[in-house]
């Protein structure tokens, strides 16, 4: 289990094809300032996110944790440009997401963000390779061959490329999803419970790849999870409760995360 | 279970909407047909009853035992009329004389179509000073002398003629100039149906339509209290030979029956097209229910798990279908009434039918409902059974119920067998010489082949849609995904495409046949005639011989020949001899002699005979035979030549010298004429002028003839297109439905695609292209099958005597049909594509 908080010195040094933005250190990969998300109006109003300010640093693996309904998925959706925010600001790199039209937002997701979902990550009609290159296909770009080979090698799918998703195991499918997210060399990858549907062994495999991608390829990863073991793979854990950030832990271990979670639960019960 | 079923109907109302529409359209077609035909029948029957209101007994020629082809002189004289008028129980007797009369409009053109342009007498009583109860004058006076006429009010309105105008009419040749003295209203059935009626004074009408002093019919009105039958018995006592008395009731009944018959023919053919639309609808309904069942797999499995029996599950799906069918049936019936009302208004504005209320018979309501429910139940039957087979364990299964990947091997084998048998039967039928014998196997073969191809469509979908890949590649990732989505569920794609295929097969087949026939007829007209013009009556009755004489006087005309029909007994058979001008006919026709020739024809002792007749009679060049003419005299004729007959010229041709002396009334069927300057507008005008700008006479060049035929074929074709449009519209609903369901099913995929960067346009394009691919697939299959059937039916047509028939592929139209399929695809995708693009991305990617 690693405790490194500044993963600037990952093994192998920066890959020539690694995300370009990663070399300019000043700006965070993604950043929220006073971000609020409110559903409904008047009496039925629900505040999902309450003036959140947070920064996801480059080449860092961040986990967002919190109990159900804490707003962790909403935060991810808002910061990834999947959902509109009510007030405040959300940025990818130096690009402000609020006010972007759907078209620009779609382009931004396509070119600068990678996604891994809990399920329905892959198109059943496409082969594994086609799924991996899908974002580039959509953009009409040719994938960087050397980078692609390296990604495929990293996730260990070289002999499965021709297979259709239904011929792959759940773990393999999710590895394809990881490869897809990495292949387009996005500035940041968002994962929404990427191991939620996997057994612990397959889950560990996928999380291992994500961590390696941060260390070895200099990738930035933000992952929503409710599993302390998964969170322990991250460099940093941000805890959410009732739409607010309640803690920020560096170098987490499964035990420390679990402890922290328990204390929140206790607090919640007392109040 | 009932409650579950009902709740499902409401829960899925958006998705069931298309199904309902499909059923609704088919049912609307059925009920529209029924309401429209019963409305027309009713209107015509009322009108014919009204038309006979003034007739209790009618005395006319007894048509039944008049020998065929022999002109019987009208035996109804003024004396008979007087006698009839004095019969005990007769209130009045009206002499009727009527026949064809052409009226020209202000531009000199014939009013109406030639078959419904009638002329009759205004019978003003014995003294000529009374009024004719049949024709009450609305304006002006009844015609009292030659040169005066009255017009029916509808015609007056249509042409704009008013009392005091001078109009041109013609009965059998010469043009008459008449003054309109009156405009009348009438219950005459012909006028009610859009015909024209010109009334002459009694003497003039007799001169024009019969002989002076004679009538074609006597209409008796009974005294109050005297029954029609009693009067008829009285009338029979004074009947001259060869005439009969019929009660007005019977005439009205006969006419009703005739109307009923012609309506039932129309009804049957309209219902056949409604049947096609419903058949197409079945595909769509079956598809919808299959998809609904697949989507509800977990729900149905849960029902099974908590104890519902298979039968209960089946029943719940069928109840759902029943509700859909009943609602759609009711709505369809209402829509049908609307369609019928619209049609009636349309026909009404064209003046084609008498006024009358919309008639909705109880039968119509019952049939519409039953059709709606039965069709829906039938289509939902298989999906319902499939629903029952869902095991209870599926409720606990994975998120995605695995798609039924049952092997297509059995299906493909059956499809191949059907297709092969069907194609073989059709091919075999084309080699059978006799058309009547070939019809049954060809029909059966066609049905088998269509079913076979339908069964095979899932198999065909892959290679055919793969063929579109190079084009789809132009659309990048959207095209690629569209292609893969289209072949993802071959059964569903097949059912959707098949619905479109059925309509396009029929449309293409009919078009191919029509093009071939049109070309064949054109060819026949131009090949067999050297004459530049044919002259005939507008209603194709006989022309006065004066017309030919007048025509021959023109400087333009270099050769003419009348065509006369003369009836004669040859051996034991009755035959028509066609009388021609033996000296000029060779210049006017272009026929292929297989032996002999025109030589000697003008002598009046020789004939030329087509091969078919010669074969039947066993004649060769030089054979001679005796003809017994209609006046009983005999003549000896020798065969001078044998030729290959066609639809334009066939049978026994003989010089007029031989037949004219024996004819009781000399008249020409048609005149062929060759002109110095050939066929052009000026010559045509000159000829028309030479004949006195006569509205009753048609002067046509070959182009007119073929254009006339082309127009007829086109009208027919357009009507068929219109009727088949319903089947295509239903198919469009099917495509919409399939796409909407696919979009719904693939919500999560679409959400994921949006998340990783496919923009709304890309999503829309993906759905549109999928729709386009499916539609074009159906289009290609339909057009292919249509061409095959068109070819096969053409072989039969060619074999049935239209020798000039060859296969014509109207590429422009076929291209248009393919474009139509594409348009169908694009239109059908409008709504589903919008829906897909608007899909809430977050909701879609959130897991359950």
Image: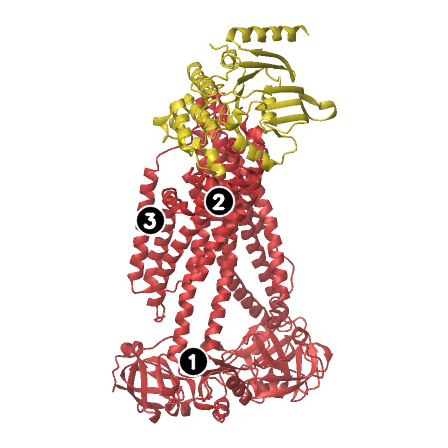
Q: Which residue is mark 2?
A: B769
Q: Secondary structure at mark 1?
A: loop
In the rendered image, the quadrant that contains the C terminus of chain B is top right
Question: Where is B9 relative to B796, above or below?
Answer: above
- In this rendering, do the residues under marks 2 and 1 share a single chain? yes
Disc 2 + disc 3, Cβ < 8 Å? no
Residue at point 45%, 35% (across, down): B383
Q: Colour of chain B?
A: red
Q: Which residue is mark 3?
A: B419
Which of the numbered marks, if any, corresponds to residue B67? 1
Disc 2 + disc 1, Cβ < 8 Å? no
Question: Where is B165 relative to B188, above or below?
Answer: below
Q: Secondary structure at mark 2?
A: helix
| Disc nearer the start of the sequence (2/1) | 1
Q: Colour of chain A?
A: yellow
Judging depth in this view, the residue of B686 and B347 nearest the camera is: B686
């Amino acid at each position: 289990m690693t405790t490194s908080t500044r993963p600037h010195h990952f093994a192998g040094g920066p890959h020539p094809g690694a995300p370009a933005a990663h070399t300019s250190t000043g700006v965070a990969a993604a950043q929220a300032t006073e971000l609020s998300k409110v559903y409904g109006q008047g009496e039925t109003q629900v505040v999902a996110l309450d003036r959140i300010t947070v920064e996801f640093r480059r080449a860092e693996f961040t986990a967002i944790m919190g109990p159900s309904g804490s707003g962790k998925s909403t935060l991810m959706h808002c910061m990834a440009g999947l959902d509109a925010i009510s007030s405040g600001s959300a940025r990818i790199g130096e690009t402000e997401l609020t006010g972007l039209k759907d078209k620009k937002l779609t382009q931004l997701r396509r070119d600068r963000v990678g996604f891994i979902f809990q399920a329905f990550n892959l198109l059943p009609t496409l082969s594994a390779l086609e799924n991996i290159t899908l974002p580039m296909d959509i953009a009409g770009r040719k994938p960087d061959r050397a980078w692609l080979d390296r990604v495929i090698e990293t996730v260990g799918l070289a002999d499965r490329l021709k297979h259709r998703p239904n011929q792959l195991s759940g773990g393999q499918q999710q590895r394809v999803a990881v490869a897809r997210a990495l292949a387009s060399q996005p500035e940041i990858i968002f994962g929404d419970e990427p191991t939620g549907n996997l057994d612990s062994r397959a889950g560990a495999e996928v999380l291992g790849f994500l961590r390696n991608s941060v260390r070895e390829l200099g990738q930035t990863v933000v992952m929503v999870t409710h599993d302390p073991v998964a969170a322990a793979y991250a460099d940093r854990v941000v805890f959410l409760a009732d739409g607010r950030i309640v803690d920020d832990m560096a170098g987490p271990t499964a035990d420390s995360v679990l402890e922290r979670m328990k204390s929140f639960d206790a607090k919640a019960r007392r109040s | 279970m009932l409650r579950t079923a009902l709740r499902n109907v409401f829960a899925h109302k958006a998705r069931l909407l298309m199904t309902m529409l499909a059923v609704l359209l088919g049912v609307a077609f059925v009920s529209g047909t029924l309401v429209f035909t019963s409305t027309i029948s009713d209107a015509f029957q009322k009108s014919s009853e009204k038309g006979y209101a003034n007739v209790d007994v009618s005395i006319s020629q007894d048509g039944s035992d008049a020998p065929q082809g022999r002109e019987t002189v009208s035996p109804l004289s003024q004396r008979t009329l007087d006698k009839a008028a004095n019969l005990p129980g007769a209130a009045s007797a009206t002499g009727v004389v009527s026949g064809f009369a052409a009226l020209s409009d202000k531009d000199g053109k014939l009013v109406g179509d030639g078959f419904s342009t009638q002329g009759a007498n205004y019978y003003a009583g014995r003294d000529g000073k009374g009024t004719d109860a049949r024709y009450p004058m609305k304006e002006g006076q009844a015609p009292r002398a030659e040169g005066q006429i009255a017009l029916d009010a509808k015609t007056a309105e249509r042409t704009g003629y008013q009392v005091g105008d001078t109009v041109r009419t013609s009965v059998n040749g010469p043009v008459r100039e008449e003054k309109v003295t009156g405009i009348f209203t009438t219950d005459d059935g012909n006028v009610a149906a859009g015909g024209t009626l010109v009334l002459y004074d009694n003497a003039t009408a007799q001169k024009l339509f019969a002989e002076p002093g004679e009538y074609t019919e006597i209409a008796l009105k009974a005294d109050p209290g005297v029954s029609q039958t009693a009067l008829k018995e009285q009338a029979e006592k004074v009947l001259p030979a060869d005439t009969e008395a019929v009660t007005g009731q019977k005439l009205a009944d006969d006419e009703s029956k005739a109307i009923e018959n012609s309506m039932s023919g129309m009804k049957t053919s309209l219902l056949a097209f409604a049947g096609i639309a419903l058949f197409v609808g079945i595909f769509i309904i079956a598809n919808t229910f299959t998809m609904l069942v697949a989507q509800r797999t977990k729900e149905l499995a849960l029902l099974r798990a908590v104890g519902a029996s298979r039968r209960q599950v089946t029943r719940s799906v069928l109840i759902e279908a029943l509700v859909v069918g009943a609602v759609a049936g009711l709505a369809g019936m209402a829509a049908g009434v609307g369609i019928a009302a619209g049609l009636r208004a349309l026909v009404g504005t064209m003046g084609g039918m008498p006024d009358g209320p919309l008639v909705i018979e109880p039968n119509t309501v019952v049939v519409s409902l039953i059709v709606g429910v039965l069709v829906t139940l039938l289509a939902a039957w298989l999906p319902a059974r499939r629903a029952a087979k869902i095991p209870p364990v599926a409720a606990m299964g994975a998120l995605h119920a695995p798609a039924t990947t049952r092997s297509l091997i059995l299906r493909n084998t059956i499809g191949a067998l059907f297709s092969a048998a069907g194609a073989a039967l059709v091919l075999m039928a084309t080699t059978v010489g006799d058309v009547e014998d070939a019809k049954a196997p060809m029909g059966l073969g066609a049905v088998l082949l269509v079913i076979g191809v339908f069964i095979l469509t899932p198999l065909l979908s892959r290679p055919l849609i793969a063929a579109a890949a190079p084009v789809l590649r132009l659309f990048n990732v959207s095209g690629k995904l569209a292609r893969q989505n289209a072949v993802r569920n071959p059964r569903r794609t097949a059912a959707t495409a098949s619905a479109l295929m059925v309509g396009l097969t029929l449309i293409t087949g009919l078009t191919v046949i029509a093009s071939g026939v049109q070309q064949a007829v054109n060819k026949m007209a131009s090949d067999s005639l050297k004459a530049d013009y044919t002259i005939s009556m507008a209603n194709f009755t006989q022309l006065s011989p004066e017309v030919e004489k007048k025509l021959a006087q023109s400087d333009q005309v270099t050769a003419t020949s009348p065509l006369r029909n003369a009836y004669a007994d040859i051996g034991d058979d009755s035959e028509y001899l066609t009388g021609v001008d033996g000296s000029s006919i060779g210049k006017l026709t272009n026929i292929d002699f297989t032996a002999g020739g025109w030589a000697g024809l003008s002598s009046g002792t020789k004939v030329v005979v087509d091969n078919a007749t010669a074969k039947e009679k066993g004649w060769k060049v030089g054979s001679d035979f005796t003809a017994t003419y209609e006046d009983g005299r005999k003549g000896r004729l020798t065969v001078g030549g044998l030729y290959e007959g066609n639809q334009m010229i066939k049978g026994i041709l003989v010089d007029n010298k031989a037949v004219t002396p024996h004819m009781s009334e000399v008249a020409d069927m048609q005149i062929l004429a060759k002109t110095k300057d050939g066929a052009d507008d000026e010559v045509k005008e000159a000829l028309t002028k030479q004949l006195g700008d006569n509205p009753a006479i048609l002067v046509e060049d070959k182009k007119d003839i073929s254009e006339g035929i082309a127009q007829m074929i086109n009208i027919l074709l357009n009507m068929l297109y219109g009727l088949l449009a319903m089947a295509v519209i239903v198919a469009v609903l099917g495509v919409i439905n399939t796409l909407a369901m696919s979009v719904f099913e693939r919500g999560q995929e679409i959400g994921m695609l949006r998340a990783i960067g496919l923009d709304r346009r890309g999503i829309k394009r993906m759905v549109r292209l999928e729709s386009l691919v499916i539609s074009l697939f159906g289009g290609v299959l339909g057009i292919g099958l249509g061409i095959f059937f068109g070819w096969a039916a053409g072989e039969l047509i060619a074999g049935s005597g239209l020798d000039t028939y060859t296969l014509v592929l109207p590429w422009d139209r076929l291209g248009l049909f393919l474009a139509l399929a594409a348009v169908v695809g694009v239109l059908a995708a409008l709504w589903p594509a919008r829906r897909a693009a608007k899909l809430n991305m977050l909701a879609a990617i959130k897991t359950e």
